[in-house]
Amino acid sequence: MAAGVPLSTRVGDIVTRTPVLDIHTHLYDPGFRSLLLRGIDDLLVYHYLVSESFRQMDIPYDRFWAASKTEQAGYIWDALFVKHSPVSEACTGVLTVLHALGMDPRQGDLKSLRAWFAALPADEHVERVMKAANVSAVGMTNSPFDDEERPYWEQSIPRDPRFFAALRIDPLLLSWETAVPFLRQRGYDLTTDRTARNAAEVRRFLADWTRRIGSRYCMVSLPPEFRYPADTDTNWLLDQAVLPHCREFNQPFALMMGVRRAVNPSLRMAGDGVGRSDLNALRDLCSANPENRFLATCLSRENLHELVVLARKFRTLHPFGCWWFTNTPQLVEEITRMRLELLGTSFTPQHSDARVLDQLIYKWRHTRAVVTKVLTDRYQALEAAGWSVSDSEIQRDVTELFGGAFDRFREKPLQSERPVQSLD
Ligand code: HDL
Ligand code: ZN
């Protein structure tokens, strides 16, 4: 970069042109056909917008849910974009997407936007969005318990290697009583008793699915009430099956902590809320399982400083993302600044959590703007201390933050973390 170019420009150029590995989304490889959501109606009926639109509409829940997706999108567009300025992050995101794809919703109506997307074949749509978002690969969320998804894995569909699998096991860990009959129906001979034999059958299930889908890590979302240690089925499964499985397959285990499901069931997927977790559980998970590696994110803003401090204590803990209700420009800045200032670059600042293909564009454009701002501030602090950073050092740091640190954490097992024997 030519001398005299402002630091913010140097950082912004590198952040913009560095592809990012999106480690957690709800997107699907185009081979999963209708499971890959895309286009204006899916953008508008995103559950973030559903909850926001009900605040501006008097329509009864049932009438909304009885409407078609097109009608629901119309309700949401009218409530959040016509009758009010779309200033929320999720609303602005829709406009960032349309603008990036060359559409001006002020000039047309939803019908013309629909026609534009309808004319775009899925494969071409994927190429266009991943290029516009500069996303190199996408982590999916793959649940053997999902009746819509499972049949695709049971046949061998052509796979796009840019969409990698992650094994999601919430029903196993959080609904053991119903998971057991599900597993028995699929040839796993077990009962709900906490026996070594049953644990072995759970591990066989985990191994079978890890191999079938080629998952890079296992993950679970946990309620605020999660405690560890505790005398629960969840913890017995963690200790006897899931964590040994992750060690055997040399994979990290991802915990997404603090989601309170179905706070308002009438909102369906939009009805989940947040609660503060007790991160002593994460502390004790790391302490008791020194040979496991943990990815972690928290839904409560109040937990995120504690998570960073814990990560300073355990190199086997890798904080990631500004999850869901914390994925707003203000909180992404606060959280990323906190993490850089306490961890350097040994974390993963963001995952998109995208459910609709096109969302990759806004979730990453909005995140890149914040990462540029925060990194520039840190490099300016270095310059004030007499340390100038080169473009190649900025590139190295951004590559780390955009998936490099995650891949290093995921792939290389740490040496045994058993306490070093005292020498005296
Ligand atoms: O549990 C999760 O992985 C969450 O991300 C939920 O899917 C949530 O509905 C969501 O989409 N958050 O962004
Ligand atoms: Zn998610």
Image (spheres, rainbow, N blue to C red):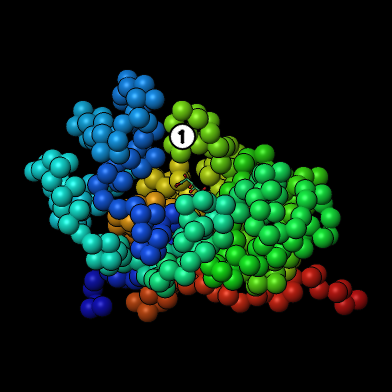
Q: Is residue 179 left or right of residue 350?
A: right
Secondary structure at badge 1 equals: helix
Q: Which residue carries the number 1 mark?
A: 268
The C terminus lies in quadrant? bottom right
Does the beta carbon at disc 1 come under 8 Å from ligand 1? no
Could you tell me the amino acid type at mark 1? Arg
Quadrant hosting residue 60: top left
Seen at 60% across and 61% down, the residue is 218
Quadrant hosting residue 26: bottom left
Seen at 15% across and 50% down, the residue is 115
Q: Residues within 10 Å of mark 1 (few under 14, many from 20)?
A: some
- Kindly tell me whether residue 392 is visible in this rendering: yes
Q: Is residue 98 left or right of residue 291?
A: left
Quadrant hosting residue 174: top right
Seen at 36% across and 59% down, the residue is 33
Q: Position of residue 332 (x, y in %)?
A: 42, 50
Say how many tags the image has: 1
Seen at 49% across and 59% down, the residue is 151
